[in-house]
DNA sequence: CTGTGCCCCTAG
DNA sequence: TGAGCTAGGGGCACAG
């Protein structure tokens, strides 16, 4: 905050960082945009009350600031109160505008206290002390600014020559056509090595940084334009990389920080840099008193800081760690991206690289790093090479996973800054879109106080007819079920009719609907909802993007478009979750309850429609938005054709845009229980090679040891691919007997009694159905790393054999007593584990 | 031995 | 003020 000549009041300065098409970095300092929010005016309020109220508010704010640094006290806290006519977004208002007061304040940090004071009650002139409910007082300042200026995240911005200081002169281009592409952003990936003591994790208080590798890349380019390794002490030359050696660690750190400022990257990346490399460097520089070090950002005089962050969401669970600020640069930690976006068994850089890049790290065990450092220029060269590779891999991952492009597209679609996508949850994206749509219709978002209430009922899972099916199973899905329900039935904050609302607004029965959960919503004829409009926009945009994608040849533009269609889909699906987030920003359980209520009704109706119209079709399972139909046709193509016909026919019984679509055929299909099944999947009909699809079973879960997952996978392949259930049984028995006889390192497994039950179950007739269910006996060892030596069992290549269809589960036979010795081994290992 | 509450992870 | 949602299988500790 600083005064600026020409502006009547001190105002915040917004900094926008960008890159021109030619790759020049730009920083805009924008003045003149001030924060504001609204309060609902009490009955009888008018122009005359604004002046006394403003004086009252100004004085109250000043009282609160007493003791603060006078240098940061603006001459005026309140920048003006204005009467406006608008509507609350919450609840159908019958088109009646209410009187609100727009409260402008001089700094973002004044919004919260000003709101609190007004909410609690201030004197409104002769009306006396009146509480005033706040609106839009919890909108992030950047989001407010972007909505008011018509900018979305990561869009191209144009400025007229000269008048660029005024925020009103900004022109944001919608990211389309010529404005679709990305500028040549500079990315810097780095990795550090420390000389730890034996068996102790390196600590910045004691252990030196001995190497830092840095790789710089221009977005869109194939190869990095810079590869540098900073080493402590001499290091033999590396091909294709610059080596800079230093005799003192202080010089090393100083020089690296200087290097960052010169390269001036837009994006800083690496692996676990938030929780390790960056804090380590900053703390180490503190210990060594390298004063200039922490100025790694783009704002002069503002150092990077290490802060503890605790982020908790039900989606991502508890996630705590450190956050390193670096103003003007995006720090993109690839570990955190992978944790958010991908479900993996291991998140080590090595495992992740092997999985996505089919490439491994340089093999240097941690224990010998210090030895290598203490050797000669050649051993340190090996260290430098290792370090360089670890700096290179995150860049490769970023490219392979299209991370940056996807993030940019998400920022564009949801209208939030890119950094929000890395540090915030789902809600802020919905709020940003909702706010923009609401503004167009003169609607205001209330500030609701969240109170956890009763949970609401979710989706229906059709009771599975468990068994092995040697007949085609067609899968029919409602595409984008929840968004299309909200569109079809006009479910929205603005259309929700409170009890008694119908009479109040003089509405007849034709003007509103009653949802399966009993809530009332007005029809689109009376008022078209904001949420349906947002959702329609997202879905329509997605169809357009998919169409454009089909035409597009240029691979770079294809990436952008593909990233966008994904962002649009994810955004549409998160709107429902937003309305149901009880601790959230604008929960409306009437909407979420109605959505799931309609969903339950629909899946039920679909099953009935299908089975009554097509006697030869049987719905054997379904979850939320899908039904699995057993068809009495001999082949996959016929199943696909029939599936398509059924889907089309059913679609006719639901209002648009609700549509049931044929998705794929399973043949054969193994249905084990709710949310647990597997099948040979022919997607989209018959074209292409079938794929083994496995849901919910140990094969796809990460809380079993790999042996269990591999065993289940191996057995499923035998059963479904080779149609050889006996082979599966034999294989399972073999593995289990290997286990019992200690031919597999048992110390790394925890064995439960289930194991022996399984061992006998597999010898039973038709046991293949029970197989997958019964192999979950092998649990993770808590103490040891993933194990399971013979991790890739050699599949027996048995010839396909016909397999008879069974329905229902085979009985699990009596279980013989557990062999004494094996049980002992097991419990011993278990005891060991606990100690 | 069974029931219950908690945790983890998945499906959608 | 910061965090999308529910349904459901299965392991496991613990009570009775």
Image (cartoon, coloured by chain):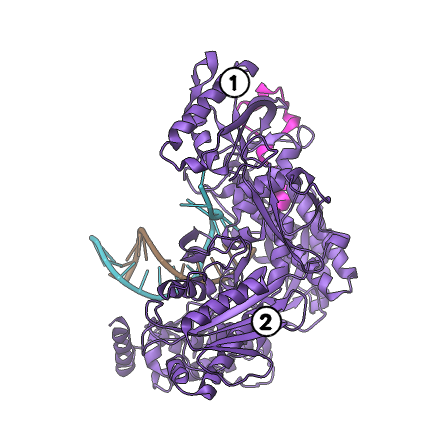
Chain colours: A purple, B brown, C cyan
Q: Quadrant of residue A554?
A: bottom right
What residue is shown with label 2?
A: A396
Task: Please state which of residues A348 and A801 is positioned toward the viewer in this rendering.
Answer: A348
**What is the x, y in percent for residue A251?**
44, 71
Q: Identify the subunit bearing mark 2.
A: A
**What is the x, y in percent for residue A677?**
53, 65
Q: Is residue A553 left or right of residue A565?
A: right
Residue at image coords 53%, 77%: A389
**What is the x, y in percent for residue A193?**
43, 74
Task: Please state which of residues A24 and A168 is positioned toward the viewer in this rendering.
Answer: A24
Magenta extent:
A483-512
Question: In the displayed structure, would residue A639 be above or below residue A489?
Answer: below
Residue at image coords 50%, 50%: A425
Instruction: Assign the C terminus of chain A to one quadrant of the image.
Output: bottom left
Mark carried by residue A51: 1
Sort mark 1 into few (<14), some (14-19) or many (20+) by Cα contacts within 10 Å.
some
């Amino acid at each position: 905050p600083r005064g600026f000549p020409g502006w009547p009041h001190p105002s915040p300065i917004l900094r926008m960082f960008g890159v021109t098409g030619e790759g020049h970095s730009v920083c805009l300092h924008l003045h003149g945009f001030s924060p504001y929010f609204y309060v609902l005016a009490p009955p009888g309020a008018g122009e005359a009350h604004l002046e006394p109220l403003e004086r009252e508010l100004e004085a109250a704010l000043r009282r609160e600031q007493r003791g603060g640094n006078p240098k940061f006290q603006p001459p005026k806290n309140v920048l003006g109160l204005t009467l406006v006519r608008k509507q609350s977004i919450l609840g159908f208002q019958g088109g009646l505008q209410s009187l609100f007061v727009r409260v402008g304040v001089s700094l973002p940090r004044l919004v919260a206290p000003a709101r609190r004071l007004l909410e609690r009650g201030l004197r409104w002139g002769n009306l006396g002390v009146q509480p005033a409910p706040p609106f839009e007082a919890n909108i992030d300042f950047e989001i407010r600014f972007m909505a008011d200026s018509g900018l979305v995240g990561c869009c191209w911005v144009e400025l007229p020559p000269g008048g660029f200081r005024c925020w009103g002169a900004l022109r944001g281009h919608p990211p389309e056509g010529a404005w679709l592409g990305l500028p040549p952003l500079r990315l810097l990936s780095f990795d550090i090595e420390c000389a730890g003591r034996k068996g102790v994790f390196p600590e910045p208080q004691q252990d030196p940084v001995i190497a830092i590798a840095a790789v710089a890349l221009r977005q869109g380019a194939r190869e990095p334009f810079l590869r540098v390794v900073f080493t402590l002490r001499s290091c033999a030359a590396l091909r294709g990389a610059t080596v800079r050696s230093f005799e003192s660690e202080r010089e090393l750190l100083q020089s690296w920080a200087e290097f960052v400022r010169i390269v001036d990257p837009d994006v800083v990346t690496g692996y676990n840099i938030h929780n390790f490399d960056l804090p380590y460097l900053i703390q180490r520089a503190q210990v060594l008193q390298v004063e200039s070090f922490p100025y790694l950002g783009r704002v002069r005089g503002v150092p990077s800081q290490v802060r503890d962050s605790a982020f908790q969401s039900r989606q991502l669970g508890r996630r705590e760690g450190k956050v390193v600020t670096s103003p003007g640069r995006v720090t993109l930690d690839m570990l955190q991206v992978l944790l958010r976006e991908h479900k993996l068994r291991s998140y080590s850089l090595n495992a992740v690289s092997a999985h996505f890049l089919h490439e491994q790290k340089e093999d240097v065990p941690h224990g010998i790093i210090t030895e290598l450092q203490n050797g000669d220029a050649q051993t340190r060269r090996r260290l430098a090479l290792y370090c360089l590779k670890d700096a290179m891999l995150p860049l490769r991952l970023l490219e392979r996973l299209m991370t940056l492009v996807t993030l940019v597209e998400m920022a564009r679609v949801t209208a939030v800054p890119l950094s929000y996508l890395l540090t915030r949850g789902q809600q802020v994206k919905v709020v940003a879109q909702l706010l923009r749509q609401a503004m167009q219709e003169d609607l205001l978002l209330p500030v609701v106080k969240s109170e956890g209430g009763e949970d609401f009922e979710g989706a229906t899972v059709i009771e599975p007819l468990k068994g092995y099916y040697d007949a085609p199973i067609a899968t029919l899905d409602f595409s984008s079920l929840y968004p299309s329900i909200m569109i079809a039935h006009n479910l929205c904050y603005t259309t929700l009719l409170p009890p008694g609302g119908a009479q109040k607004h003089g509405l007849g029965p034709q003007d509103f609907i009653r949802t399966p959960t009993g809530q009332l919503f007005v029809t689109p004829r009376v008022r078209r909802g904001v949420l349906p409009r947002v959702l329609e926009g997202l879905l329509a945009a997605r169809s357009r993007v998919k169409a454009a994608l089909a035409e597009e040849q240029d691979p770079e533009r294809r990436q952008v478009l593909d990233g966008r269609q994904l962002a649009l889909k994810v955004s549409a699906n998160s709107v429902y979750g937003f309305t149901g987030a009880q601790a959230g920003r604008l929960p409306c359980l009437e909407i979420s309850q109605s959505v799931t209520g309609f969903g339950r009704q629909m899946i039920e109706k679909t099953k009935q429609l299908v089975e009554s119209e097509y006697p030869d079709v049987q719905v054997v399972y379904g979850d939320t938005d899908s039904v699995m139909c057993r068809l009495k046709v001999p082949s996959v193509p016929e199943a696909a054709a029939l599936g398509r016909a059924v889907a089309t026919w059913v679609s006719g019984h639901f209002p648009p845009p609700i549509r049931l679509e044929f998705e794929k055929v399973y043949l054969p299909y193994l249905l084990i229980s709710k949310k647990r099944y597997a099948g040979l999947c022919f997607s989209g009909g018959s074209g292409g090679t079938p794929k083994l699809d496995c849901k919910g079973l140990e094969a796809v879960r990460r809380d079993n040891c790999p042996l269990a997952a591999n065993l289940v996978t191996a057995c499923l392949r035998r059963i479904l691919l080779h149609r050889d259930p006996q082979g599966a049984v034999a294989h399972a028995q073999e593995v289990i007997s290997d286990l019992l006889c200690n031919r597999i390192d048992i110390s790394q497994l925890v064995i439960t009694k289930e194991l022996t039950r399984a061992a006998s179950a597999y010898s039973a007739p038709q046991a293949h159905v029970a197989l997958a269910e019964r192999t979950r006996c092998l649990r993770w060892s808590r103490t040891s790393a993933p194990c399971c030596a013979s991790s890739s069992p050699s599949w027996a290549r048995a010839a396909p054999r016909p397999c008879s269809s069974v329905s229902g589960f085979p009985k699990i036979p009596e279980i013989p007593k557990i062999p004494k010795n094996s049980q002992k081994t097991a419990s011993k290992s278990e005891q060991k584990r606990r100690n």
